[in-house]
Amino acid sequence: MSKTILIIEDSKTEMEEIKSFLKIFDVILLEAFNGKEGKNTAIEKHPDLILLDVILPDIDGFNIARELKKDDETKNIPIIFVTSKGEDVDKFWGKKIGGAAYITKPVNKELLLAEVKKIIG
């Protein structure tokens, strides 16, 4: 059975790049272009992994992650932050909230694939 990855990313260009990297895996890719849509998709579809941008037009990724980690239905879904917010304090909060990894943009393909592989096998 295929694993499912939800990508929450507001940039269509970044979304397409990340999707192109993930083609090596036999996975189903779900897309969300804002925080509300992403949170609702996570609750409805229960993906095996979420790739989450921090900077989104409506709700920031840290708040989405906090909400998902508080919910019994979604708290165990691993989250990899993929964002341009690369300050140490941002990385600290990403880990504190429960992020499995924190990858800064521009995305290093090998790093992203290694982190995804750790989670989905």
Image (spheres, helix red, strand yellow):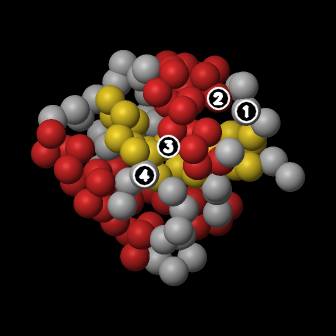
Q: Residue 51 bears which disc, if any?
A: 3
Q: Which callout, 3 or 2, points at the residue further toward the start of the chain?
A: 2
Q: Which residue is mark 1?
A: 25
Q: Residue at x 40, y 76 (%)?
A: 70
Instruction: Give the residue type that dot 4 points to.
Output: Ala
x%, y% of residue 113? 56, 30
User: Is the Cβ of the residue at disc 1 closer than 8 Å to that at disc 2?
Assistant: yes
Say which mark, if any, is on residue 36: none
Q: Quadrant of residue 114?
A: top right
Hey, what amino acid is under mark 2? Leu
- Where, quadrant-wise, is the C terminus in this rendering? top right
Task: Indicate the quadrant where residue 67 lies.
Answer: bottom left
What element does badge 2 sit on? Answer: helix
Residue beneath the point at 42% across and 69% down: 69
Three-letter code, disc 1: Phe
Q: Name the outermost residue toward the bottom.
A: 72
Q: Nearer the viewer, mark 3 or mark 4?
A: 4
- 31 or 87, nearer to the observer: 87
Which residue is at 38% across, 54% downward? 99
Nearer-N-terminus badge (3/1): 1
Cα distance in 3D space between marks 2 and 4: 17 Å
Q: Where 74 sits versus 80, above or below?
A: below
> Which SS class for mark 1?
loop
Q: Secondary structure at mark 3?
A: strand
Q: Amino acid at mark 3?
A: Leu
Q: Is residue 5 visible?
A: yes
Q: State the residue position of label 2.
A: 22
Q: CA distance from mark 3 to mark 4?
A: 10 Å
Q: Who is closer to the viewer here, 37 or 81?
A: 81
Q: Nearer the viewer, mark 2 or mark 4?
A: 4
Q: Residues within 10 Å of mark 1 (few under 14, many from 20)?
A: some
Provide residue 35's location: percent of width, then percent of height. Answer: 42, 51
